[in-house]
Image: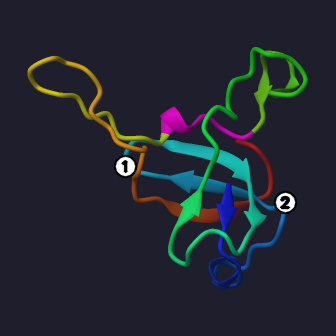
Amino acid sequence: MKINPADAKTLGLKDNDLVEITSPAGTIVTEIKVWEGVGPGTVAKAYGQGHWAYGQVAAKEYGKVPRGGNNNEILIDDYDRLSGTSCRNGGFTRVSIKKVSKII
């Protein structure tokens, strides 16, 4: 996950720290990168970095310890009432962030 340097400083975070990201839908654990390209008060996380079944790039141990957390775990489900299809636009949600020492 990328975080603005000012926000990282406020939260006492630095590059490669593990953080727990919690939204109303769930919680994941991932590493952070401090980056000025993310605006203050926001964070950005690449989609697709939580799948564990593709070998050593996606998992520290195949099928057991994923790298990065799955964004779907923290995104709110939102569906169109007529068609039943997803109506999320961009996957925006409010999150809280706290430093952790290991993957839970």
Which numbered disc flags the more N-terminal residue, 2 or 1?
2
Secondary structure category for the residue under label 1? loop
Q: Which residue is mark 1?
A: 24
Question: Left of 79 or right of it: where is 44?
Answer: right
Q: Relative to the observer, which residue lies in front, 85 or 21?
A: 85
Report, in whole angstroms, how far the alpha carbon at label 2 lies from the one at label 1.
25 Å
Instruction: Give x and y (percent) for residue 50.
Output: 67, 32
Q: Residue at position x 32%, y 33% from top?
A: 77
Q: Which residues are magenta?
A: 68-73
Residue 65 occupies which quadrant of the picture? top right
Above or below — where is 24 with respect to 7?
A: above
**What amino acid type is highlighted by mark number 1?**
Pro
Secondary structure category for the residue under label 2? loop
Question: Left of 59 or right of it: where is 76?
Answer: left
Q: Residue at position x 73%, y 70% from top?
A: 35
Q: State the mark number for residue 16.
A: 2
Q: Residue at position x 41%, y 51% from top?
A: 92
Determine the residue located farthest toward the left in the rendered image. 82
Residue 10 occupies which quadrant of the picture? bottom right
Instruction: Give x and y (percent) for residue 29.
Output: 67, 47
